[in-house]
Image: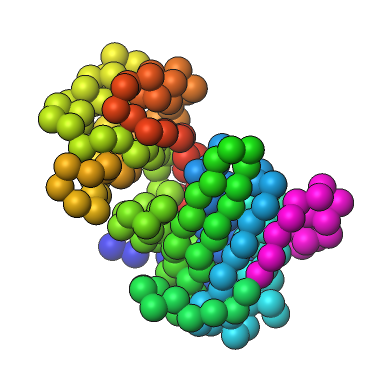
Amino acid sequence: MVSLLDIIGPVMVGPSSSHTAGACRLGLLARGLVGGTPQRAHIELHGSFARTGEGHGTDRAIAGGLMGFRPDDDRLRSALEIAEREAFDYTFEKTTLDDAVHPNSARIALELGGRSASMAGSSLGGGRVLVTSVDGYAVELTGHLPSIVLVAGDVKGSIARIASLLADDGVNIATLRLSRKQKGGDAFMVIEVDEQPDEKVRDDIRALPWVRWAQRLDQVGA
């Protein structure tokens, strides 16, 4: 089924839904992994992002997303200047990502306080995005729903315990995906939920003894 959004595209600052709206949403998701605007970020641009991204505003869009600007925020037009004023230390590099799933792809490494994260993702068109890697874990994250992401020890009963905590806090799970690098090692969970979870939900999950870290990610797309 084709939606109206597929026909007319997202509400956004132009010129391109792929190079601007999608790039901004990748920045927003990366920002969520460290819990706010990073102090430092290194952004690697792949494929079309690298070849034509500057002219289409991809660099401004990603930097704006990292600062919390959404695709329809007029501040995206001057995001790089704002970043300079805010002493946000960012660098861009044109590269080739061997594991990229789409020509419009980027890898973002960022730091805030004592937390660092690395994320790879692609802009699929129409403002849609797909995050394929976080801290070396293979993931599938679209930003279509609010999410909780976490790394936890791969212990028996961990999924059931986390699901129970969410139910106790009145949060309904839409999807849950788990990725691990090896049996018995840490596992990365992406939990999409129907409503935006509050900080208590995140803190309850963080308090579990086998959870390494957990963050809430806002919905960034329709």
**Which residue reaches farthest right?**
85
Where 127 falls versus 142 (above or below)?
A: below
Image coordinates of residue 161 in percent, x first then y, are 21, 22
For this orientation, the residue located farthest to the bottom is 51
- Place residue 137 in its image quadrant: bottom left
Magenta segment includes 106: no
Left or right: residue 116 versus residue 132 is: right
The colour scheme used here is: rainbow
Left of 80 or right of it: where is 39?
left
Residue 197 picture quarter: top left
Q: Which residues are magenta?
A: 75-92
Q: Residue at x 44, y 21 (%)?
A: 203
Residue that appears at 43% across and 49% down? 143
Query: Majority secondary structure of the magenta segment?
Result: helix
The answer to whether any part of residue 53 appears in the image is yes
Pick the quarter of the image with the N terminus. bottom left
Residue closer to the observer: 129 or 12: 129
Query: Is residue 14 something one can see in this rendering?
Result: no
Residue 83: within the magenta? yes
Q: Position of residue 149 (x, y in %)?
A: 38, 39
Q: Residue at x 47, y 23 (%)?
A: 198
Q: Quadrant of residue 80?
A: bottom right
Q: Position of residue 39 (x, y in %)?
A: 69, 47
Q: Is the residue 135 above or below the residue 165 in the image?
A: below
Q: Residue at x 48, y 81 (%)?
A: 96
Residue placed most toward the observer, 5 or 162: 162
